[in-house]
Amino acid sequence: MDTNILLENGTNELEVLEFTIGDKHYGINVAKIREILSYQPVTPIPNSDPTVEGIFMPRDTMITVVNLSACLGFEPSEEGGLFIITNFNKLNIAFHVDQVLGIHRVSWTDIIKPDQTVNANEESVTTGIIKFDDKLIIILDFEKIVSDINPETGLRVSQIDELGSRDRSDANILIAEDSPLLSKLIQECLKKSGYVNLSINADGKAAWDTLCEYKAQGDPHDKCDLIITDIEMPLMDGHRLTKLVKEDDAMKNIPLIIFSSLVNDEMRRKGEQLGADAQLSKPEIGQLVDAIDRLIAEARAKRAS
């Protein structure tokens, strides 16, 4: 199946691959997918997580195979089915599923955010739900699934401890991140690095609304020194948020960092075209702090000159 579908920049759209485990329908952002392969025998790894089936090496690239059914609390999938080969957080991972049904082009505004009963804490692996042809497709949080297997794949929090004590309390940072777990980790890391004045927004739409409130009250630079945004978010994605900020005369000089598991070559080109000031791949939280330090200093020097 061809997953090389190009989308225009900043349109707030995505392609979702629909697949099944048993009789349940799930979805994954096509931007995460490298290819889809038929099931292949794998080599088990001793003492690995019970959800890891093993490894295999198509075209000399070693890929870890994760049994997605087991991750979701169901009976593990048996031999057969398909491998969805993904690349995010600088990792190549295959997810073992039963069937692939097709690709749907949808707007982020069409993705329903789970309510508190479904998404009540940081343990949820559901980021959104799409109603399509009278069925519900559950969008899974693959970063959360992988970080449950190895927490260092989520954010390398250990990098922050090397910074030591710093005071950055004069800087205001706005964050757009829909994952409760990653949002909490980013906040903890930034506070450890001295950045304590944080405006937390659960999606791009909430972040844009906050920025518009700042603008209505005067110069938005007075309330926001820098913006950090994920790419994948319900209601409004990070690319759309970047486009809106960089096209607004009052906001365009606020430094904006895209911090996402999806910063590959193609996504980097899109971010550059939209005007992002920096783009960093999770889990490099130490590099994120370095970029924040540099961009805030540069922006303040420009405004002072």
Image (cartoon, grey):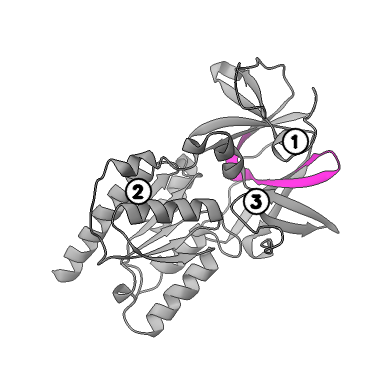
Q: Nearer the viewer, residue 172 or 219?
A: 172
Q: What residue type is labelled 3?
A: Ser
Q: In the rendering, which numbered label is found on residue 288?
A: 2
Q: Which of 6 and 39 is in front in this view?
A: 39
Residue range corresponding to the magenta coloring? 19-34
Whether residue 20 appears in magenta in the rendering, the answer is yes
In the picture as drawn, the residue positioned furthest to the bottom comes out as 217
Residue 147, horizontal then vertical, whole percent: 55, 39
Looking at the image, which residue is at 44% across and 41% down? 283
Is 123 drawn above or below residue 54 in the view shown? below
Q: Where does label 1 land, which residue?
A: 69
Magenta highlight: main SS: strand
Q: Where does label 3 land, which residue?
A: 124
Q: How many marks?
A: 3
Q: How far apart are marks 3 and 2 (CA)?
A: 25 Å
Looking at the image, which residue is at 78% across and 29% down? 77
Lower sequence index among marks 2 and 1: 1
Q: Which of marks 2 and 1 is in front?
A: 1
Q: Residues within 10 Å of mark 2 (few under 14, many from 20)?
A: many
Looking at the image, which residue is at 72% across and 41% down? 72
Q: How far apart are marks 1 and 3 (CA)?
A: 15 Å
Q: What residue type is labelled 1?
A: Ser
